Image: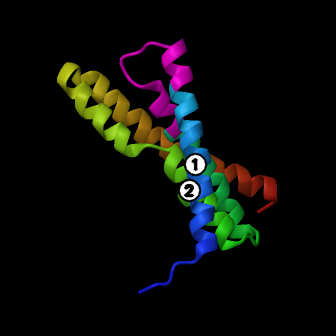
Amino acid sequence: MIGLNIGNFFAVAFGGAVGASMRYAINIYMLKNYSHHISLATIIVNLLGSFVAGVLFALFVYTNISNSYKLMLMTGLLGSLTTYSTFAIETVLLVKSSWELAVLNIAINLFGSLLLAFIGFRATNILLGN
């Protein structure tokens, strides 16, 4: 059994608290200001989280960032900010009312997240001169 590193545990917990709070704030803002059939808040956090994941991954490859910071940012912050479980439930609910919106929701979340992770990674590589 792998022993629990208490520093890493709290790094993930702190990152998770920040990411979950960001996700909540984005959701409240989008619900207040935009009314759509698909959840723009879920799309935004998934796309933003994917871009940031690409940036962070590039930084992790080319810099010497501690494991605690990696865990705090990727597992904690992005793990609680992005929301593929919510995306899955929202898509199931959309299927009941509109296959077209369900497919659009899947396409934006999946392909948009992959594209933005790639863009974040490439842009960071370019900025770092790699």
Dominant secondary structure of the residues highlighted in magenta in the image: helix
Q: Residue at x 49, y 40 (%)?
A: 46
- Tell me the SS state at disc 1: helix
Residue pictured at 44% horizontal, 43% vertical: 83
* Disc number for residue 17: 1
- Quadrant of the image for the C terminus? bottom right
**1 and 2 marks in contact (CB < 8 Å):** yes
Colour convention of the picture: rainbow
Left or right placement of residue 103 versus residue 107 in this view? left
Question: Is-magenta flag for residue 40?
Answer: yes
Q: Which mark is residue 76?
A: 2
* Circle 1 Cα neighbour tier, 10 Å, few/some/many (<14 / 14–19 / ≥20): some
Q: Is residue 116 above or below residue 25?
A: below
Where does the image place residue 33, in percent across and percent down from the top left? Answer: 54, 13
Residue 118 or residue 49, whichever sits in front:
49
Query: Which picture quadrant has residue 20?
Result: top right
**Residue at horizontal 54 percent and vertical 37 percent from the top:** 23
Q: Earlier in the sequence, mark 1 or mark 2?
A: 1
Foreground residue, 32 or 101?
A: 32
- The picture quadrant where one finds residue 126 is bottom right
Which residues fall within the magenta stretch? 28-45
Q: Which one is in front, 47 or 35?
A: 35
Dot 1 amino acid type: Ala
Residue 102 pos. (x, y %): 29, 28
